[in-house]
Image: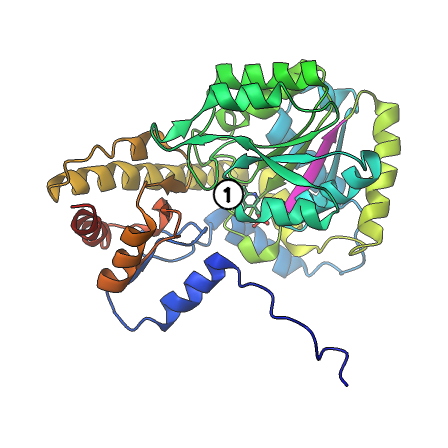
Amino acid sequence: ASIFAAVEMAPRDPILGLNEAFNADGRTEKVNLGVGVYYDDNGKIPLLAAVKTAEKARLEAMPPRGYQPIEGPAAYNTAVQNLLFGKDSALIANGQVVTVQALGGTGALKVGADYLKRLVPGATVYISDPSWENHRALFESAGFPVENYPYYEPSTRGVNFASMKAKLEQLAPGSVVVLHACCHNPTGADLSEAQWGEVVGACRERGLVPFLDMAYQGFADGIEPDAVAVRLFSASGLQFFVSSSFSKSFSLYGERVGALSIVTASKDESARVLSQVKRVIRTNYSNPPIHGGAVVAAVLNSAELRQMWEDELAGMRDRIRAMRTGLVENLKAAGVAQDFSFVIQQRGMFSYTGLSVAQVDQLRNDFGIYAVSTGRICLAALNSRNIGYVAKAIAAVVK
Ligand code: PLP
């Protein structure tokens, strides 16, 4: 018999399943709000001009394609550090930050999780309730038990910070706490700077291992303000992990460009930690691909291209904001009495709308509008042509 004869079908990824259903839908007015991708006002994934310029130059130069260092090139890793920790960071100057290139934010989380399994094998990992779909599976596949800490409060459509903090203060020392550094996915509800300060305090008091996941730097208020959590942890003297991604901020999803950064207590610790992280990488995919990281490094390390990128990033951020206010206005205009202004307060690409499973079903069946069953919508999938239609459809299902 085949060795595969008894293999069971694994459950489908719920969001990819939604995309398949959307693609099969023949209605021309259909809208996919289930995605986790930024679309421009024409409904296209943008090619940033800064990226295009850097790519053209690379193509002209036709550099040889040897193996990269296991940790990726220094030009890339240093640029990542400057974005996350600030270019004048004392931690960087002291050699306390280890950064390795990774295959997107997901790859960074996986390398971090595998390394943590060697460092603190008995730990439990805590993720927010709810969290990005993949967090639980990823840390479980690295061998950790994964539990939730309270986060989202449906009644306020914000964070239940008192419950979150109370939970953190009860965790066993050495527990790993995964925190969304900004633009919480899926809820859009973020912590304030003061609340971040309290989270840092709780991590210090309980001896927790913070793991910040930064997938949307620049999508809320800007590159620097969105790094507030990283900066507060940096100032705390604690050791912590940061996974980061350029998928969204450079619109380079399929190139898989991200990084894992680990803050240690000293330069000497950094050297030893890096040697162990390299071992994790070496036995997994050996070394990272060249193209995406080279493009990002070229943009970040050129004053001119960097300015171009920052302007384009601001353009994406502003368009999402305009869609947030636009949706709220259009809902009002469509006669919706319910207060949807929370959509304007939420940050990043997503909003937990509070729509029920039945309402999400009705949006799909009656209007060809696809959202995640939790009521999560992607604001970056709205544009000037579909926003009125979407608002009218939501008005019809909430009445
Ligand atoms: N972390 C969070 C919170 C995300 O929302 C995402 C992407 O959706 C990722 C990590 C993964 O990013 P990447 O696509 O770069 O692997």
Look at mark 1 in the image and give the residue it sits on.
249
- Residue 277 screen position, x and y as percent: 82, 41
- Residue 89 screen position, x and y as percent: 67, 20
- Residue 109 screen position, x and y as percent: 67, 43
Q: Amino acid at mark 1?
A: Ser
* Quadrant into which the N terminus falls: bottom right
Task: Establish whether ligand 1 lies closer than 8 Å to the Cβ of label 1.
Answer: no
For the stretch drawn in magenta, what is the main secondary structure?
strand
Asked whether the viewer can see residue 87, the reply is yes
Q: Is residue 182 left or right of residue 294?
A: left
Q: Is residue 37 left or right of residue 60?
A: left
Asked whether the viewer can see residue 69, the reply is no
Up-down relation of residue 208 to residue 292 (above or below): above
Q: How many marks?
A: 1
**Residue 164 is covered by the magenta coloring:** no
Q: Residue at x 83, y 44 (%)?
A: 278
